[in-house]
């Protein structure tokens, strides 16, 4: 399901819908030529007409007006706008369950606006980096955090069509950020993340090492010239890396900083990355899923990725985790298990994912938390990093473009960029970077 097709739930954002931002718009002129053309284009779709009326009513209620004809007067009256802003602050505070004074609610709403800006910056910083200057948000919109001011700018003909679209986009993203914040407060995700880190430090990692102590090693790997899949890998110490003069064709060197866990009287190294998905990433996931409810779409708020030397070490680590949970006073159950480390096809409904991906993936439920675990061997991890059609950088490109998110946030009508062409350009760029990133540099 694409974010920009007829099944998109974000009707107000579509540039081929009734709320498209265009240069030739009129306010309060129901019998104008533009209005008649608009009505003939969308009036035959009953569902779309209903959605339009619902959104229009929300706009009127939010601004305390009865008709679009009142918009110019409100735009010209700063005192009336200030009153609307104060009222809107209270309404939004109640909608998202924000406790506190008006200033505290405003501070939280400003955080939502900053998250909305961070979504755009996240894409401009990596997946669309070569086009960052084309996609930069107008200063007048990026520096505005008041929802009333943003909404009014959508209908203010003094603003360029790009700025008006960006004001609307920011409001949509702010609404998603508010839903995510409300969900995080309901689930107490911050404290759960801290508790998960404490569980790892107290019960999983070796007590013989200090908290945060890491061993630096390198994966010396050889890759297939066509697919760049890993065909051979060995672990070398830092001293061995220093003695290397040069790498052969198709060879790569990848740094890992590993922790240690103990099992059966032996120590086993493991590279671990623990993360709590930030608000901007969650907003993007809601868009990719064409969903407004984070309780439905965002099931991987807490995550751990581990890399071990062999499949047997992977099994040992999983068993060590379940035993450690028991020691901490909680049962750990494994849910939604997918294991393709030793063969088989990865079955995922996620846009852009490859059936050839090798990994052990499951959710661990323990201590009131549900944590996503993705576990690799050294070889599968290198494939996750570098192999054509599987590499995570390529996956990120595919899911942003193929889900419609790129076109949704940066429509061609506004930014004059061909997103399908950019998709292929970025896939080629990341593939070249991945093939070159492990070269030995003295």
Image: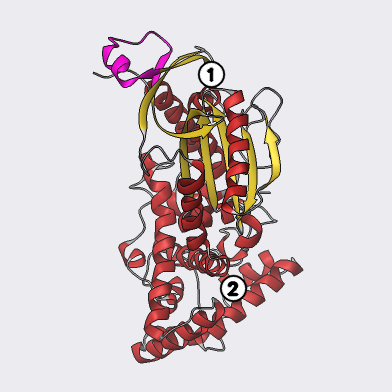
* Extreme residue toward the front, this view: 265
Front position in the image: 30 or 403: 403
**Count of numbered labels shown in the rendering:** 2
Residue lying farthest to the left in this orientation: 442
Q: Residue at x 52, y 43 (%)?
A: 304
Earlier residue among tags 1 and 2: 2
Left or right of 288? Residue 155 is left
Residue at 36 percent across and 35 percent down: it is: 214
Which residue is identified by label 2? 35
Q: Horizontal and vertical percent for residue 419? A: 50, 42
Query: Is 384 colored magenta in this rendering?
Result: no
Q: Which residue is mark 1?
A: 229
Horizontally, residue 395 falls left or right of residue 119, namely right
Q: Position of residue 389 (x, y in %)?
A: 57, 27
Does 423 appear above or below 33?
above
Q: Which residues are magenta?
A: 236-253
> Residue 193: in sight, yes or no?
yes
405 vs 334, left or right, is: left
> SS for tag 1?
loop
The mark closer to the camera, 1 or 2, is 1
Crowding at mark 1 (Cα within 10 Å: few <14, some 14-19, many 20+): many
Q: Is residue 410 visible?
A: no
Residue 318: image quadrant is top right
Mark 1–mark 2 Cα distance, whole angstroms, equals: 57 Å
Q: Residue at x 65, y 42 (%)?
A: 362
Q: Residue at x 57, y 44 (%)?
A: 324
Image coords of residue 408 (percent x, y): 54, 53
Which of 37 and 351 lies nearest the eye of the viewer? 351
Q: Residues within 10 Å of mark 2 (few under 14, many from 20)?
A: some
Between 326 and 418, which is closer to the camera in this rendering? 326
């Amino acid at each position: 399901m694409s974010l920009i097709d007829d099944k998109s739930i974000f009707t107000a954002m579509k540039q081929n819908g009734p709320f498209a931002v265009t240069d030739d718009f009129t306010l309060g002129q129901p019998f104008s030529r533009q209005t008649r053309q608009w009505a003939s284009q969308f009036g035959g779709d009953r569902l779309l007409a209903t959605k339009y009326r619902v959104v229009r009513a929300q706009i009127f209620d939010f601004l305390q007006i009865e008709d679009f004809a009142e918009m110019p007067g409100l735009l010209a009256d700063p005192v009336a706008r200030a009153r609307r802003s104060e009222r809107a602050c209270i309404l939004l505070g109640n909608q998202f369950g924000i406790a506190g004074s008006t200033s505290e609610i405003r501070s939280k709403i400003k955080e939502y606006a900053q998250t909305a800006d961070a979504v755009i910056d996240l894409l401009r910083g990596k997946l669309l980096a070569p086009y960052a200057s084309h996609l930069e948000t107008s200063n007048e919109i990026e520096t505005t955090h008041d929802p009333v001011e943003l909404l009014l700018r959508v209908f203010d003909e003094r603003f360029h069509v790009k700025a008006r679209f960006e004001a609307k986009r920011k409001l949509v993203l702010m609404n998603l950020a508010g839903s995510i914040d409300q969900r995080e407060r309901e689930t107490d995700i911050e404290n759960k993340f801290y508790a998960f880190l404490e569980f790892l430090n107290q019960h999983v990692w070796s007590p013989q090492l200090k908290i945060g102590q890491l061993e630096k090693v390198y994966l010396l790997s050889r890759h297939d010239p066509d697919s760049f899949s890993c065909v051979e890998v060995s672990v070398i110490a830092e001293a061995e890396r220093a003695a290397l003069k040069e790498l052969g064709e198709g060879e790569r060197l990848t740094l890992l900083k590993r922790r240690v866990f103990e099992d059966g009287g032996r120590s086993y190294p493991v590279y671990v990355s623990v993360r709590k998905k930030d608000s901007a990433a969650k907003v993007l996931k809601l868009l990719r899923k064409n969903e407004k409810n984070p309780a439905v779409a965002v099931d991987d708020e807490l995550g751990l990725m581990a890399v071990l030397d062999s499949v047997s070490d992977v099994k040992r680590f999983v068993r060590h985790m379940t035993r450690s949970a028991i020691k901490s006073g909680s049962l750990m159950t494994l849910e939604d298990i997918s294991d393709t480390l030793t063969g088989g096809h990865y079955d995922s409904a996620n846009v852009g994912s490859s059936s050839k991906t090798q990994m052990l993936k499951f959710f661990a439920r323990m201590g009131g938390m549900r944590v996503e675990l993705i576990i690799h061997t050294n070889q599968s991890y290198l494939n996750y990093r570098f192999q054509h059609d599987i590499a995570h950088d390529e996956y990120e490109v595919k899911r942003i473009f193929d889900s419609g998110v790129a076109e949704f946030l940066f429509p061609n009508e506004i930014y004059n960029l061909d997103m399908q062409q950019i998709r292929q350009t970025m896939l080629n760029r990341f593939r070249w970077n991945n093939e070159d990133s492990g070269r030995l540099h003295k």
